[in-house]
């Protein structure tokens, strides 16, 4: 049996899990998740800090401001250090340490890690998320769109996929329960944002895997990828409404990921404001995403379904605040947060999040309770009225197939959306046993060094460095920039968080690097 037939049978089986029609399905709210790529916490004119900053003045995002005015803004929202782990967490509700999809994915069986001078990076599930059990080095799990599809939703995927690697079933988002797939498969970025380039490097769609898929109708046109994807999203939503189907729209923008190419609709205003070309181009990409959000919200009003649609807006990781090969110079800044993409410091993890659920979220409300991307899975299912029966997935490791437990790591934040008290002391965990990128960040602890685990509980955050066992403790309420290491000043808090982090990593059997100097595995933080 080939894998295409296997996927079809798996999806058919998933469709038997819940009713697909009837009054209950018809009354369910529509749900939209707009996920941007590499948009940092500060990359909006809507402030997510306690006060506006000069960076908020740089950008023009009136539609994000509009969504925040009409919904709830989260000031302590998190994703992961890089993109694929975030997308897999959103699809499965499982933490990256549990799935072992802990870095970005690309070609089948090929790790994307940079060599680390002092660590041997462990075997991880470099083939990403898969719809079948038999793909080595991958995780198989029930996905969010499968759950919604089985409950009668039209499931729509627009934009970047990046769930599984090339030449595997997981390269195609359709394999995970999406009825409509436009724009993306396995690649993590487009070759170009310009239709005149056919959205590929050198204008040749066959020259590179770094391209947007399913967009041939726009080849040769003077149109920006963000706008083209928005046109497709609008058409897909209109069709779902015309067919009388509740819909789940997962709109995963490529922007503002590299290549940093100016959106011609907006770039001139930033050049006129005196920004360097790279930063002006980046700001124009942010405004293009914002325009897309506004177009979707206008569409909901035009169709008369805005009061029956929940809208989520967030990013997949913190902003890329270091020079890159393709951009050449820094194009965004996360200050006052420390570091950026590829780091478990706040600059790499903390992201903007706004949710509007009409009739539930109070307009203009703000929540400071920490939430994270794995929480989207149970939250969206609860909004949809879909009962989740358990994950029951499997890890396809180099050691064989290991069954996952049935529990999710994510927790629904519907109570927060209703204005109820949350769990301010609930721990959040990150595990990144990798070196990301080829560049050293500012100082000795930038994302180019990598290989850390971290936990946040309440205002306290512990970062554990695999390279030497070093621990850094920060009070984020007093030191959001993570400048003052309090590990020696607060030994009990350090010990408590080390135990908490070590217990979680042990529970999920998290893979750890090996130290080159000793040939020994890096110990868990509570073993130091």
Image (tube, grey):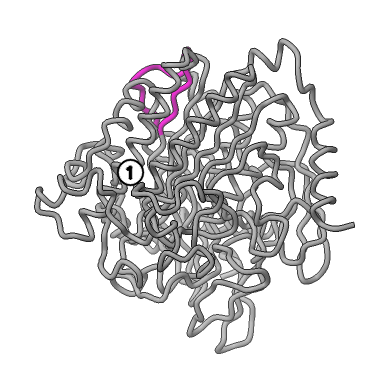
Seen at 50% across and 39% down, the residue is: 251
Instruction: For label 1, count other residues whose C-alpha is less than 10 Å away and answer few (under 14), some (14-19) or many (20+).
Output: few
Relative depth, front residue between 453 and 36: 36
Q: Residue at the bottom extreme?
A: 517
Mark 1, residue position:
477
What span is colored magenta in the figure? Answer: 354-367
User: How many marks on residues?
Assistant: 1
Relative depth, front residue between 19 and 271: 271
Residue 485 falls inside the magenta stretch: no
| Left or right: where 158 falls relative to 261 | right
Residue 365 falls inside the magenta stretch: yes
- Name the spot of residue 6 as percent of width and height, x first: 84, 51
Q: In this view, does 211 lie above or below 94?
A: below
| Left or right: where 397 falls relative to 86 | right
- Name the spot of residue 119 as percent of width and height, x first: 54, 80
- Name the spot of residue 252 as percent of width and height, x first: 49, 44
Q: Residue at the right extreme?
A: 1
* Quarter the N terminus occupies: bottom right
Task: Determine the secondary structure under disc 1.
Answer: loop
């Amino acid at each position: 049996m080939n894998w295409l037939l296997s996927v079809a049978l798996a999806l058919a089986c998933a469709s038997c899990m819940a009713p697909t029609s009837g009054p209950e399905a018809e009354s369910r709210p529509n749900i939209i998740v707009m996920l941007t790529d590499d948009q940092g916490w500060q990359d909006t004119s809507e402030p997510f800090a306690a006060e506006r900053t000069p960076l908020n003045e740089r950008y023009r995002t009136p539609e994000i401001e509009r969504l925040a005015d009409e919904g709830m803004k989260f000031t302590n929202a998190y994703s992961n250090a890089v993109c694929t782990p975030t997308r897999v967490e959103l699809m499965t509700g499982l933490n990256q340490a549990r799935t072992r999809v802990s870095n970005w994915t690309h070609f089948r069986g090929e790790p994307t890690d940079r060599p680390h001078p002092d660590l041997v990076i462990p075997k991880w599930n470099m083939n990403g998320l898969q719809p079948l059990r038999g793909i080595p080095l991958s995780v198989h799990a029930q996905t969010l769109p499968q759950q919604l599809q089985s409950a009668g939703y039209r499931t729509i995927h627009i934009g970047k996929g990046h769930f599984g690697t090339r030449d595997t079933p997981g390269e195609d988002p359709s394999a995970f329960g999406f009825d409509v797939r436009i724009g993306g498969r396995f690649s993590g970025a487009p070759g170009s944002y310009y239709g005149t380039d056919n959205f590929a490097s050198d204008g040749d769609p066959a020259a590179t895997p770094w391209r947007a898929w399913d967009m041939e109708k726009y080849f040769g046109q003077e149109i920006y990828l963000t706008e083209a994807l928005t046109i497709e999203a609008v058409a897909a939503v209109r069709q779902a409404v015309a067919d009388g189907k509740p819909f789940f729209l997962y709109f995963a923008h490529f922007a503002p990921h590299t290549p940093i190419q100016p959106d011609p609709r907006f770039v001139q205003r930033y050049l006129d404001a005196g920004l360097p070309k790279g930063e002006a181009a980046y700001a124009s990409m942010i405004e293009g995403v914002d325009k897309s959000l506004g177009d979707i919200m206008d569409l909901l009003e035009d169709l008369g379904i805005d009061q029956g649609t929940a809208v989520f807006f967030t990013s997949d990781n913190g902003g890329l605040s270091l020079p890159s090969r393709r951009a050449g110079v820094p194009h965004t800044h996360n200050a006052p947060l420390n570091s950026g993409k590829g780091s478990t410091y706040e600059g790499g993890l903390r992201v903007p999040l706004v949710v509007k659920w009409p009739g539930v979220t109070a307009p203009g409300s703000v929540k400071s309770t920490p939430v994270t991307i794995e929480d989207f899975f149970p939250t969206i299912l609860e909004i949809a009225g879909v009962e989740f029966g358990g994950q029951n997935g499997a890890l396809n490791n180099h050691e064989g197939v290991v069954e996952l437990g049935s529990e999710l790591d994510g927790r629904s934040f519907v109570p927060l959306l209703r204005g109820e008290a949350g769990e301010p002391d609930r721990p959040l965990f990150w595990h990144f046993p990798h070196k990301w990128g080829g560049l050293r960040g500012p100082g000795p602890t930038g994302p180019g060094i990598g290989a850390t685990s971290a936990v946040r509980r309440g205002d306290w955050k512990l970062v554990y460095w695999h390279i030497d066992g070093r621990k850094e403790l920060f009070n984020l309420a007093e030191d959001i920039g993570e400048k003052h290491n309090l590990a020696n000043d607060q030994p009990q808090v350090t010990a408590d968080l080390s135990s908490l982090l070590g217990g979680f990593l042990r529970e999920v059997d998290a893979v750890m690097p090996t130290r080159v100097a000793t040939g020994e595995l890096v110990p868990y933080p509570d073993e130091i």
